[in-house]
Image: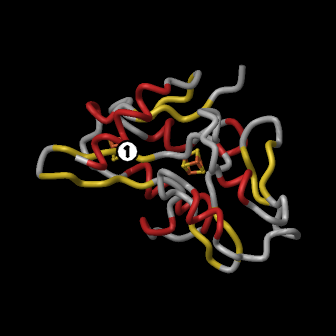
Amino acid sequence: MSLCLVPYPENCTGCRFCELVCSLSHDKVVNLKKARLRIVRKDIINDIPVVCAQCTNQEEECCANVCPEKAISFDGTALVVDEEKCTGCGLCEDACAYGVIRVEGIAQKCDLCGGDPLCVKFCPFGAIRYEEMKKENFQKVLSLLEG
Ligand code: SF4
Ligand code: SF4
């Protein structure tokens, strides 16, 4: 059973260390907008960590399913983008239920840091964990986003 990022919104304080470390490690800049996850502030005390589910929840319209170039595939750890194949069409960005794929030239998505997720390491509050899929946590995130 492969592991994925699992969000625990009730633990998130909105410190945004996760976004910071993600942008720094993958884009070599401190730019929270470049992070491959996002923290959504609902109100002064409620922040929602929104992470890639690696489509292990079998959404019909996940990024890998809609890519016409078959540029997104499972590498044994995560769904990753083949830079040679991606044309930057943006269909994956539109399909992602969590809004955590960004197309900048080509698709940028969470690669689970190769199996050692930095956002998990640096979250001081256990609001993102690396463990077996918990669908109910992702459903909670979606309902909080809608609410
Ligand atoms: S590091 Fe943890 S507590 Fe801080 S914003 Fe990210 S998920 Fe929330
Ligand atoms: S696992 Fe790595 S790539 Fe994915 S959101 Fe966390 S820091 Fe970013």
- What residue is rendered at 62% in x and 77% in y? 104
Residue for point 55% across, 55% down = 96
Question: So how many labels did they put on this image?
Answer: 1
Q: Is residue 124 above or below residue 71?
A: above
Q: Is residue 10 left or right of residue 19?
A: left
Q: Residue furthest left?
A: 44
Say which quarter of the image contains residue 82: bottom right
Q: Quadrant of residue 95?
A: bottom right
Residue 32 picture location, percent across and down: 42, 65
Residue lying farthest to the front in this orientation: 60
Taking depth in this image into account, of 89 and 130 the one nearest to the observer is 89
Does the Cβ of the disc 1 residue fall within 8 Å of ligand 1? yes
Would residue 88 be found to the left or right of residue 47 on screen?
right
Which one is nearer the viewer's eye here, 130 or 103? 103
Q: Residue lying farthest right? A: 84
* Residue type beneath disc 1: Pro
Q: Is residue 131 above or below residue 117?
A: above
Q: Nearer the viewer, residue 42 or 60?
A: 60
Q: For the N terminus, which image quadrant?
A: top right
Sort mark 1 into few (<14), some (14-19) or many (20+) by Cα contacts within 10 Å.
Answer: many
Write the residue at 31% across / 36% down.
Answer: 9
The residue labelled by disc 1 is: 49
Please tell me whether residue 66 is drawn above or below residue 140 in the rendered image: below
SS class, disc 1: strand
Residue 11 percent across, percent down from the top left: 28, 32
The image's colouring method is: secondary structure
Q: Is residue 48 left or right of residue 22?
A: left
Q: Residue at x 39, y 50 (%)?
A: 17
Q: Residue 59 placed where, x, y %?
A: 60, 41
